[in-house]
Amino acid sequence: MNEVRPGFALAAVVALLAFMVITPGWFLPQPATASGSLLAGHLGEHDAPESDCGPVSDDPIKRVTLVAQATVWEVAPGESFPAWSFNGVIPGPVICLREGDTLVVTLENRLPTIASFHAHGLAREPSSDGTFLTESYAVPGGSYTYTLQADSTSVGTWAYHDAVAELDEGAFIDGLSLPESGEGIERGMFGAIIVYGEDELDADGLPVGYDHELVLIEAEFEAEVTAGPVYMTINGRIAPATPHYQFQAGETVRFRIINVGPNANHNLWVSGLDWRQTQSGEHVDSVLFGALEFGDFTLEVGEPRETRYVCSIEGHEAAGMHGLFSVIE
């Protein structure tokens, strides 16, 4: 793994100080650091399924506030770069819904560029599409509210992301047109939406048929964003800060996997284990996704072992896309 170059670190500090002088306070980057345990999955005895969504409320209207903001993102201890984010974290918060729910998202924009919320998989009017052509975005210092529906075709795993943000403010002069932009994704503005079908949750709002359910998001940050190394990340981190997945022997685990890209294909391979596509039951050796593809996969973790997971596409492991995978007694 390449180390962060000292020159980049100094340049980043100088740039941030300059930004503070010329920019209103609510545009300022907020610190974001890796903290707490890196373990994910089975952390102790539990009588109920454990899910990244937690118990999903039966309130038919789900309200979420997202703040688009600048963030100094730490992908691993001592390795950081200036990024954009929702709510100061990369990926943004997981949004969990039930079939039939209405999702109301209020986007507050603290970036010096327009920003938006664009969701895959949910029904909406053009005014809630989060695109430039429909003018459904929040201006700098403003907010915008989106209303979307989780209908029967929405059940599954989806991504949300910005679709309009650009670093160059000159593009927003009145009278000029701006195509849809992927720069928000490239700089960290993305997250997951989970929609459960009517029979997928128990009376407590927890997933039926699984001991654990986790969201795993693959993404790359290229050199033009980091001004240094290319980072290939799992849930916003590179090894050794990627999740160490731990489960108990015999457990059944559902991974909800998203490749937000926005440019590269990624796969996921766990030594000694087969993936099963949740809906079809088809078994595969590894999971492969193109940019902005997503799906649900199930693992029967079997007997105790120490192994690892990795993206085996050339160069991706070296850029940080791997981690530890344990099955304990």
Image (spheres, rainbow, N blue to C red):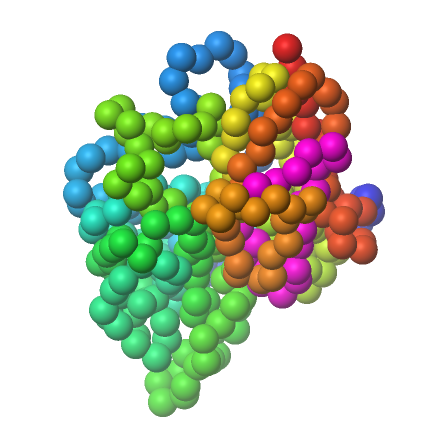
Inspect this view and state whether residue 240 appears: no
Q: Quadrant of the C terminus?
A: top right
Q: In the displayed orientation, state which residue is furthest to the left.
A: 60
* Rendering coords of residue 217 (x, y %): 55, 46
Residue at (30% x, 43% y) in the render: 197
Closer-to-camera residue (70/272):
272
- Residue 267 is left or right of residue 189, and the answer is right
141 relative to 103, above or below: below
- In screen coordinates, is 23 left or right of 130? right
Where residue 188 appears, as percent x and y from the top left, is 53, 53
Question: In the picture shown, does residue 53 fall above or below 100?
Answer: above
Q: What quarter of the picture does the N terminus occupy? A: top right
Which residue is rendered at x = 30% and y = 76% of the image? 134
Camera-side residue of 22 and 214: 214
Quadrant housing residue 259 = bottom right
User: Which residues are drawn in magenta?
Assistant: 258-276
Q: How far across and down, in percent of the image, does residue 52 sit? A: 43, 32
Name the spot of residue 150 as percent of width and height, x first: 26, 53
Relative placement, left or right, of 121 versus 143 is right
Q: Is residue 183 magenta?
A: no
